């Protein structure tokens, strides 16, 4: 079975409420200038170009300079990065030296001082702190950014990072990030549901349940919150409640627009947890690929036995 986070599968067995996410969009022509230089591996020339902009009389140009210089620092400070996670694994991939991150943050902080309503600066800072594993600083930056930036849909500017942290399997960091968001934006079913999802990632099912229950109450027609409630009950061994909420999620969203695989997952639940082979076979034929139609592949004798239990005998 699968627990969900909004807008797509972010980590195995989890979905989180997330949104689209863009780092450091720039003034069109100026960004082309330094962007082309970095693409051509001419970071020194990009540094000279952008350093000159820091003395411009144009505020927009000075802000652009800080974005550019942050990118230059990161470009020149690329390195391999090894980061552990909360599920007993880790990742080895591209990253940045600690010195490069420090220098890039100086420029982004200057940019935020100059243009606190430029969301790209806030997103860029959060992203750098995230990929460098500075999760405590990331939470502090989130709180500061939320107090400075007053965009009309700020919550959905911050939500993508919960999905990013889930994808990185940084469940504890994601939980702490979500808890900060919950203080800033109370009664958001997306944030509250994600707190529950992070507890589930940590196998803290008893702690997860009240958050996911609250999320479902706040948004009773949300198929993701409803599905996650059923999933959590399944982890707690309550098959009856699990079936109630999983099937309710299917009723709310019959086509599975948030997660197309959901109907097949429910069919597998019917087979493996409800042990209704006949019904599971029917559902799997509708919703699952051929190699996942396991209920239909069971021996005929088993199918007949199940049929005799499922259909009342004729009198």
Image: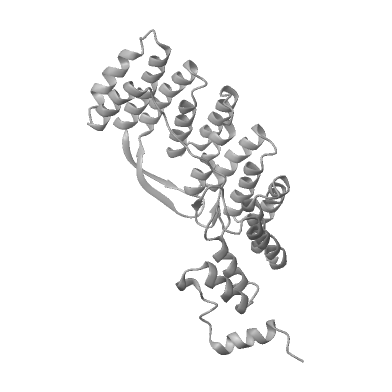
Determine whether, in the image, residue 52 is placed left or right of residue 234: left
What residue is rendered at 58% in x and 69% in y? 267
What residue is rendered at 39% in x and 26% in y? 104
x and y percentages locating residue 310 in the rendered image: 68, 81
Q: Image quadrant of residue 76?
A: top left
Determine whether, in the image, residue 91 is placed left or right of residue 196: left
Q: Nearer the viewer, residue 249 or 3?
A: 249
Q: Nearer the viewer, residue 135 or 273?
A: 273
Q: Determine whether 21 is above or below 208 in the image.
A: above
Q: Nearer the viewer, residue 121 or 279?
A: 279
x and y percentages locating residue 99 in the rendered image: 36, 29
Which colour style is shown? Answer: one colour
**Residue placed furthest toward the front:** 315
Q: Determine whether 94 is above or below 238 in the image.
A: above
x and y percentages locating residue 64 in the rendered image: 38, 20
x and y percentages locating residue 297 in the rendered image: 50, 81
**Residue placed furthest toward the top:** 57
What residue is rendered at 31% in x and 36% in y? 78
**Residue placed furthest toward the bottom:** 315
What residue is rendered at 55% in x and 88% in y? 300
Location of the C terminus by quadrant is bottom right
Determine whether, in the image, residue 46 is placed left or right of residue 310: left
Q: Nearer the viewer, residue 134 or 143?
A: 143
């Amino acid at each position: 079975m699968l627990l969900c986070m909004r807008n797509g599968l972010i980590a195995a067995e989890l979905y989180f409420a997330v949104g689209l996410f863009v780092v450091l969009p720039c003034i069109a022509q100026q960004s082309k200038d330094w962007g082309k230089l970095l693409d051509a591996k001419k970071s020194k020339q990009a540094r000279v170009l952008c350093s000159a902009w820091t003395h411009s009389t144009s505020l927009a140009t000075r802000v652009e300079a800080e974005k550019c210089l942050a990118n230059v620092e990161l470009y020149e400070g690329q390195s391999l990065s090894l980061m552990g996670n909360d599920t007993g694994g880790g990742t080895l991939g591209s990253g940045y030296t600690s010195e490069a991150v420090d220098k890039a943050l100086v420029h982004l902080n200057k940019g935020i001082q100059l243009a606190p309503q430029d969301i790209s600066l806030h997103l860029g800072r959060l992203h750098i702190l995230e990929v460098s594993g500075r999760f405590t600083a990331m939470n502090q930056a989130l709180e500061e950014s939320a107090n400075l930036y007053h965009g009309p849909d700020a919550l959905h500017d911050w939500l993508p990072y919960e999905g990013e942290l889930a994808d990185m399997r940084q469940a504890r960091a994601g939980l702490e990030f979500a808890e900060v968001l919950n203080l800033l934006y109370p009664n958001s079913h997306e944030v509250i549901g994600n707190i529950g999802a992070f507890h589930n990632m940590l196998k803290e099912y008893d702690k997860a349940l009240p958050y996911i229950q609250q999320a479902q109450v706040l948004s009773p027609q949300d198929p993701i919150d409803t599905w996650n409630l059923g999933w959590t009950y399944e982890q707690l061994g309550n098959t009856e409640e699990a079936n109630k909420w999983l099937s309710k999620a299917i009723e709310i969203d019959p086509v599975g627009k948030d997660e197309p695989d959901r109907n097949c997952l429910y069919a597998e639940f019917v087979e493996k947890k409800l042990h209704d082979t006949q019904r599971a076979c029917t559902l799997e034929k509708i919703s699952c690929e051929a190699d996942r139609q396991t209920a239909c592949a069971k021996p005929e004798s088993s199918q007949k036995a199940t049929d005799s239990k499922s259909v009342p005998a004729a009198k």
